[in-house]
Image: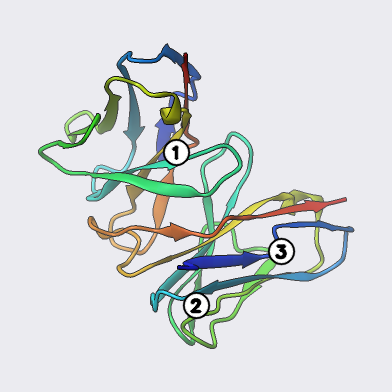
Amino acid sequence: NAGVTQTPKFRILKIGQSMTLQCAQDMNHNYMYWYRQDPGMGLKLIYYSVGAGITDKGEVPNGYNVSRSTTEDFPLRLELAAPSQTSVYFCASSFLPAGANTGELFFGEGSRLTVL
Amino acid sequence: RKEVEQDPGPFNVPEGATVAFNCTYSNSASQSFFWYRQDCRKEPKLLMSVYSSGNEDGRFTAQLNRASQYISLLIRDSKLSDSATYLCVVEKRGDYKLSFGAGTTVTVRA
């Protein structure tokens, strides 16, 4: 079972470049999320989606964009990369809303991004 | 005040020992609580949900104290494979978002 697949696993960007982190899930989950994890900090929600065609901002959306054209895919776009976007990015999906008490987030393996 | 606070540790314990640690949360309206496990340079994975009455899953016991707004995790008979960072996760009442603690690192030594 593939679960949640993220690509690329590693990437180095120069300041001002743009890129897209890909995320795909094969569990038919409606709910998908993008988080970033910085050293010593909890995961922060960047964007989330409750279904195809519906996206919304999380806690730290500035500098990012998302789209959700299909149930399976939820790409994250970084525009004009800045050193502050150096982080580990996790895509996740869930069958129930993240806060449901029987809910479970399934995470991808992460994408390590460095902006120099 | 952070929404979820955890002692970062590390907790260094010998195999077979019991280790316990807490997590405090600030939103008294939160209804759902979880412990996730994250191995070094890996993705988080759900360890267990935390229910009001407390719950056990094998060697792991989770407790919720609503009055004092903390949850706890106890690991009995620690194994080397229990070495990981344990993330406390709390639901933000009324929306789809979760608050993640920064994690408590546990290292079990032979």
Answer with the quarter of the image where residue B2 lies: top left
Asked if both marks, 3 and 2, belong to the same chain, the answer given is: yes
| Alpha carbons under labels 3 and 1: distance apart | 26 Å
Q: Position of residue A68 (x, y in %)?
A: 54, 82
Question: As drawn, is A80 to the left or to the right of A68?
Answer: right
* Crowd tier of the residue under label 3, counting other residues whose Cα lies within 10 Å: few below 14, some 14–19, many 20 or above: some
| Alpha carbons under labels 2 and 1: distance apart | 24 Å
Answer with the quarter of the image where residue B51 lies: top left
**Residue in view at x 33 percent, y 70 percent:** A95
Quadrant in the picture for the N terminus of chain B? top left
- Which structural element holds mark 2? strand
Cβ–Cβ under 8 Å for marks 3 and 1: no
**Residue in view at x 50 percent, y 19 percent:** B10
**Front one among B22 and A5:** A5
* Crowd tier of the residue under label 1, counting other residues whose Cα lies within 10 Å: few below 14, some 14–19, many 20 or above: many
| Chain letter of disc 1 in the image | B
| Chain letter of disc 3 in the image | A
Above or below for B7 versus A19? above
Q: Position of residue B26 (x, y in %)?
A: 34, 38
Circle 1 residue: B101
Q: Earlier in the sequence, mark 3 or mark 2?
A: 3
Callout 3, which amino acid?
Pro
| Alpha carbons under labels 3 and 2: distance apart | 22 Å
| Chain letter of disc 2 in the image | A
Circle 2 residue: A55
**Front one among B106 and A14:** B106
Question: As drawn, is B88 to the left or to the right of B58?
Answer: right
Answer with the quarter of the image where residue B108 lies: top left
Callout 2, which amino acid?
Thr
**Residue in view at x 46 percent, y 85 percent:** A52
Asked if both marks, 2 and 1, belong to the same chain, the answer given is: no
Q: Which mark is residue A8?
A: 3
